[in-house]
Amino acid sequence: MAEAGPAPLGAALGGVIGAVAGELQEENGVDLRCGVRVVSLEGDATGQLCRAHLSDGTALDVNVAVTALGAVRNAEWLAGSGLASGPWGVACDAGCRAFDVNGLVTDDVFVAGDASRAPQPMFGYQFLAVEHWGNAISQAEVAAHNMVSGETERWPHLAVPKFWSVQFGTEIKSVGVPSVADEVAIVQGSVALRRFLAVYGYKGRIVAAVAFNQNKWFEFYEPLIEQAAPFPPTFRHVDEPAEARPVPAGFPAAANPTQDATVVVTGHYPNERRARLTDRRVP
Ligand SMILES: Cc1cc2nc3c(=O)[nH]c(=O)nc-3n(C[C@H](O)[C@H](O)[C@H](O)COP(=O)(O)OP(=O)(O)OC[C@H]3O[C@@H](n4cnc5c(N)ncnc54)[C@H](O)[C@@H]3O)c2cc1C
């Protein structure tokens, strides 16, 4: 049974692409049970593990249990500190300065990595917690710079979120934030062959790309996301499928209407990167 890994991956990729991630597990012998918790483990007369009871009322005969650690932020020690800290992490501004409980920015407490929840200008200023090591590194770089810099010299953290995973020989890479998308298009390769590139769009701009065994084309999309490039992409692709029309992305409707705000990001190095509001609207 795999509770922690594939289910969040499938949920993060949405609709048809998320389903492919789930099928990949099942085809390789993983009995995937999403939305189910282990409520108790039972031992036999000798104290050896023999059964796991699940929250859906079923039980599995097992002799090994693996517990996944690291999925919950250790922010409890900040309780009562006056910071905006809780199960969601520690809220901060795009310059990694922590918010106090009132949502006011502090000037001497900085947050980076998994524990932080910061507004993402590229994605409608939604507060996002990005739990990948690349984000922890680039955010820490910005936090360190801002700690020793005056108000006018500070940097915003504007890195496009990225992650990769290898599952049963399939390389999966994601750039951007697929879950804000309303549409997705397979622009290259074939889902059936598990070798494809999917581009995600929100209201006519590219917000993410996901590659299954198509890594060499992948980095091309990062600058397109930064530039709020038009979706669906207008250029031709190598190995283009006959039907590249966008379909619904398959994520639950967003509760947050601020995805409408659109910025483009310029600059390459952290000291250069800036967000610029754009009134670009695609009818
Ligand atoms: C099982 C697993 C697999 C992962 N796989 C990938 C992957 O393939 N690719 C990827 O990009 N990311 C992966 N991640 C995510 C990645 O590990 C994290 O995003 C990254 O480690 C975050 O770095 P961090 O410095 O913010 O936090 P952490 O690496 O969690 O470091 C926080 C540190 O603070 C310490 N700490 C906590 N509370 C206190 C306290 N009160 N006082 C002092 N110290 C404290 C903790 O012990 C810990 O050492 C994975 C995570 C897990 C759990």
Image: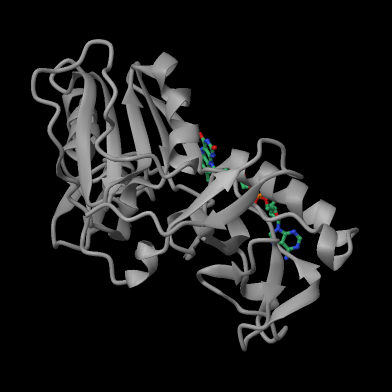
Where 192 falls versus 182 (above or below)? above
Which image quarter: residue 201?
top left
Count of marks, rendered view: 0
Q: Going by the picture, which residue comes out furthest to the left?
A: 243
Task: Describe the colour scheme in one phrase.
Answer: one colour
Task: Kindly tell me whether residue 129 is visible in this rendering.
Answer: no
Out of 232 and 36, give the one closest to the viewer.
Answer: 232
Where 198 falls versus 92 (above or below)? above
Query: Residue 204: x, y in percent?
Result: 27, 47
Task: Kindly tell me whether residue 180 is visible in this rendering.
Answer: yes
Query: Residue 76: x, y in percent?
Result: 62, 74
Which image quarter: residue 269?
top right
Out of 9 and 13, give the one closest to the viewer.
Answer: 13
Q: Is residue 67 left or right of residue 188?
A: right
Out of 140 and 180, give the one closest to the viewer.
Answer: 180
Query: Residue 61: x, y in percent?
Result: 21, 43
Quarter containing the N terminus? top left
Quarter containing the C terminus? bottom left
What's the residue at 83%, 67% (across, down)?
151
